Image: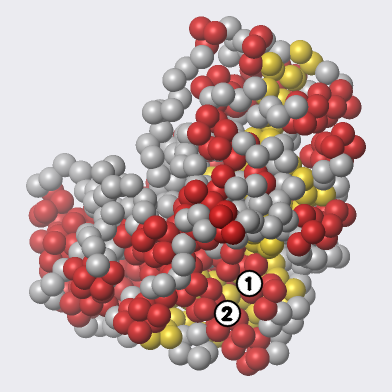
Amino acid sequence: MLSFLAEFWSFMRVRKKYWLLPMFVMLLLFGGLVVLTQGSAVAPFIYTIF
Amino acid sequence: MRILGLSAFYHDSAAALVEDGRIVAAAQEERFTRKKHDSGYPGEAIAYCLAEAGTTLDAVDHVAFYDKPFLKFERLLETYLSMAPRGFASFRMAIPVWIKEKLFQKALLGKKLKEAAPDIDWEAKLLFAEHHQSHAASAFYPSPFERALVLTMDGVGEWATTSAGIGAGKDLEIVREIHWPHSIGLLYSAFTYYCGFKVNSGEYKLMGLAPYGEPRFAQTILDHVIDLKPDGSFRLDQSYFDYCTGLTMTSEKFHALFGAPPRAPDKERLEQRHMDLAASIQAVTEEIVLRLVRDLARSSGEKNLCLAGGVALNCVANGKVLRDGAFEKLWVQPAAGDAGGALGAALTAYHGYKGQPRRLNGAADGMQGAYLGPAYSQEDIEARLTGAGAVFETLGEQAVIAATADAIAAGQAVGWFQGRMEFGPRALGGRSILGDPRSPSMQKTLNLKVKYRESFRPFAPSVLREDLADWFELDADSPYMMIVAPVQGERRRAMTDDEQALFGIDKLNVVRSEIPAITHVDYSARIQTVHEETNPRYHALLEAFKARTGCPVIINTSFNVRGEPIVCTPEDAFRCFMGTELDLLVVGDCLLEKSAQDPALKISYEDRFELD
C-alpha cells in the first residue's frame, strides 16, 4: 500500500494535478467502505471505457 | 533481452514475447480459455509464449503492460467531476471496481507473476506504456518501413482516442492527439449499439451491413452529431451520447434525431433503415479517416502510413485510404485491437525504454504472417485426435493438399487446421474454414449451417498474390485481410434492372460475379493475399485448387461458430467439426470425413456460445 501511495503521489506531481488529492482521499475512504460491504465489484457497462 | 508484453483487464487480454527485438510468440487469452474477448489476467497466453521460446518467467527481463491505470483513473475522476451531478449512476458502478481492483493493477500483476516466479521482484521489472503508444508501436515497429507516419484510432485509451506519431528507426514520437470524449471508435460503437449489435464485437456486422443501405443519414450525422474540420479533427456533441455519464451509448436526443429507440435485437428484425444507418456511419467514418490521413500526409511529408487501434480493423476504410493515394504505402497491424497492445507494449519497452536498435527484414514485415500462436506436431495431432475419439487417415503432404482441393472444388465445407495459430481477429489459413467461392449457394450455406450467423454477412477470399490483379482491383500485398477492394470489372456480372431494384438483403441472392460467394453487394471483397514465403502449405492448396478449377481464390473464414473464439487445439477443431455441418476436417496431415465419425460424438453447437 505504501509503494502504491508513493507512486500515486509522484503521478500527481508529474501531472501537476494536486487538486485530485482531496477527491482521491474521500474516494478511498468511502469507496473502501462500499467495497468492504459488498461481494463483487463488476461494472455492468455496455463498454468498459473506465 | 526478453520482454513480455501484456494486455488485460478491459477486453481481449493477450500476451506477446519479444526476444532481442524479434517477435517470438503472441496469443490472445480467449483462445485458451474459450471465453470470447476474455478480459482476465492472460495466464495461459503467458505460459504458451514462454513455452514457445523454451524459457521460463525467471528469464524475462521486463514485463510491459499496455496502458497506464493512473492516467485512466485521472480521466475517470475529471469526467465525473465535470459532469456532476449527472453520471452518479455510472460513478457508483465504476468507483468500487477501481477502488477494489483497477487502481492496484501493478500490485495485482506483480502478485500473479510472483505465483509463477516467486523469487523475482516483479514490481521493479514492470513497465507501463500508454495505450496509444502501445498501438502505435504495434503498427510501426513490425512494419517493413524505416520511416512512417503512424495513425492510431480506437474507442479510448487513457485520454487519447486518436493519435498520430512519427516513426523513424527505433524512435517513435506521438505528435498529435484527439482526446476523450471525442472518439471515432465510440461514435461507430454508438451506431453499433443503436442498430442492436453488441458493442466491441458487432462493429464488423455494421460494416458488413453498410453496402446494403444508402447513406441517407450521413449529412444528419455531420450536421448534428459531429463537428468535423477540414484537417480531420473533430468534436462530438455529447448531448447525443450517454457513454460519459450513463450505462448506455446513446441518449434520448440521439434516438429522437434518428426517429426511433435503439433496435431490440431479440424482438426487432433488421430493416432497411438499419442498413441505411450502417451505410451512413460507414461513410462518415471514411470521411473522417480520409481527412485525417490527407492532412497528416501533407503536413508530415512522410510516404508510408502505419495503422492500428480498433478503427484500423475497418478494412473498408483502409481500402479507401490505400486507393486515395495520400501515402504511397500502407501497413496495418493485423492485431489492431487491444490484443495487439500487448505486442506494442513489449516493443515500446525494447526500442523506446531500452533504446535497442530496430532491424528491418528487407521488404518483409516482422509479423511472420501473423502466425505467432501455438502449433502441434503431427505426432501430437494424432494422439489428440485419437483421444477425442476421431476417425482419421494420415496422408503425405501432397495427398492432403490434393484431397482438400478436390473437396473444396466439389462444394464441400472444409475445416483447415495447419501450423501456428494466427495472432489477431482474422484467420489466415492456419485456423480457417474453406469453401468454393464460385458456388452461388456457398455464402448462405456457410453462414446458416456452419457458422450459425446472420445470412447478410459476407465472406472473405484468399487469393494467390501472383494472381491478385487478375481477380481484384488491388495491386498491393494484403496478407492480413485488412484491405477491402473491388472484384475486377471483367469478373463481375452486371445486374439486370429487376435485380438492381431489389433492396437490402434480397440483393444477396443475386449472382454478381464469377466468385459470388465472396462478392459483396457492392462488388467489394475483403482480400487476403497468400504468399509462399509465409504460408507455403496454404499457398500450395490454392495452387492445387487453381489447377483443378482455373480459380486461384478460396473462401476463407475463421474456424469457429458465431460467438466462439477461433479454435486453438486439434480437440477444439474436432469439437467444432462435430457440432457443425462441416464436411471435411484437415488437421496437419490427418483427414477426417464427417461420414466416418461416430454419430454419438455429434454435439449441439448452435446454442453453445452467446450471440455477439
Q: Relative to B73, does residue B434 appear above or below in the rendering?
A: above
Q: CA distance from mark 1 to mark 2?
A: 8 Å
Where is residue B365? Give x, y as percent.
76, 61
Which kind of residue does numbered mark 2 sit on?
Leu
| Horizontal relation, residue A6 to residue B549: left or right | left
* Disc marking residue B290: 2
Q: Residues within 10 Å of mark 2 (few under 14, many from 20)?
A: many
SS under mark 1: helix
| Mark closer to the chain start, 1 or 2 | 2
The reply to whether the C-beta atoms of the residues labelled 1 and 2 are less than 8 Å apart is: yes
Question: Which residue appears at 13% of the width and 76% of the height?
Answer: B84
Residue B426 vs residue B56, the one in the foreground: B426
- Quarter of the image containing the N terminus of chain B? bottom right
Residue B27 vs residue B1, the one in the foreground: B27
Question: Which residue appears at 24% of the width and 51% of the height?
Answer: A44
Give the letter of the chain under mark 1. Answer: B
Residue B552 vs residue B502, the one in the foreground: B502
